[in-house]
Amino acid sequence: MPSTNVVLESEPKGQSVNSKDQEGLILDHRPESIRKRLALAPKRQNISDAVLGGIDGCITTFAVVSGSVGAGFPSSVAIILGFANLFADGFSMAVSNYESSKAEQEFIESVRKSEARHIEQIPEGEREEIRQIFKAKGFDGDLLERIVNTITADKKVWLDVMLMEEHGLSKTTSNPLMSAGVTFAAFISVGVIPLMPYLVSTLNMNQQFTVSAVLAGIMFFVIGMLKSLAVAKPLITSGLRTLFTGGAAAAVAYFTAHFMREIFNISTG
């Protein structure tokens, strides 16, 4: 039975489709290209911060809108509560993300200092840890000893290896201020969208809510699609999943408000 590689190479049609990608991969994996790429400090992406902020911002404001409609409150209440929650929750999320990123940085730094102290105090014990780590990967004999000697000859390399292999920590951490800023900007810019129809006085309450729901649905779907582009996942599936999540949160807010209104017999007239 012919291998998959042989089949692909024997099909001009498939080869023409992937030729540009193949050429790009070859260029990216030339020695000089690899050397330049590895010489650059690894960058932490803020995609997750933007997606989290955007989704939560849209859910927060549309949930307020849905809850206001479910409770029978006038449009003015939806606007006031919506904008109050938009900025308060956006600020809260940004601060939380900042503190989380800062705590991650401080934890990694504390582990690095601890390992550096161990290397100074018990170098042979730390060398043995390196030896056992790479022995578990299948290296042995003279090759294993050369690996141990090479790694432990450079303290920075030694520390980086211990952080990643022993503690499972990445040397790339997020910038707390950047994470907070991206989260807040995404939260506000996306979260304000469901509130826009309530600023149009020519629409009645039902029209405002309908337009708000449509806009929120579009934003959920678009955010899901953008997320899929970043992580190479199916566009439609990711968009629908995010749309379902946001819609479910809004439905919970609507029916909870409506239920509480009936339970406590609250009149909004």
Image: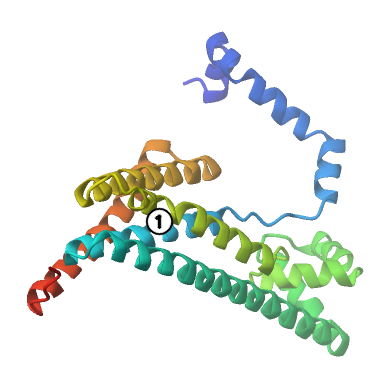
Q: Nearer the viewer, residue 70 or 230?
A: 70
Task: Provide residue 83's location: percent of width, then percent of height.
Answer: 42, 64
Q: Is residue 109 above or below residue 46?
A: below
User: Farthest bottom residue?
Assistant: 121
Quarter assignment of residue 236? top left
User: Farthest right residue?
Assistant: 153
Residue located 13% across and 73% down the image: 261
Task: Provide residue 168's location: percent of width, then percent of height.
Answer: 63, 69
Q: Nearer the viewer, residue 234 or 146?
A: 234
Q: Nearer the viewer, residue 168 or 134?
A: 168
Q: Amino acid at mark 1?
A: Cys
Task: Provide residue 4's location: percent of width, then percent of height.
Answer: 52, 24
Q: Nearer the viewer, residue 123 or 234?
A: 234
Tell me if 62 is positioned left or right of 48 in this view: left
Residue located 56% across and 62% down the image: 184
Task: Provide residue 67's location: percent of width, then percent of height.
Answer: 24, 65
Tell me if 174 is positioned left or right of 249 in this view: right
Q: Secondary structure at mark 1?
A: helix
> Label 1 neighbourhood size at 10 Å, few (<14), some (14-19), many (20+)?
many
Q: Which residue is mark 1?
A: 58
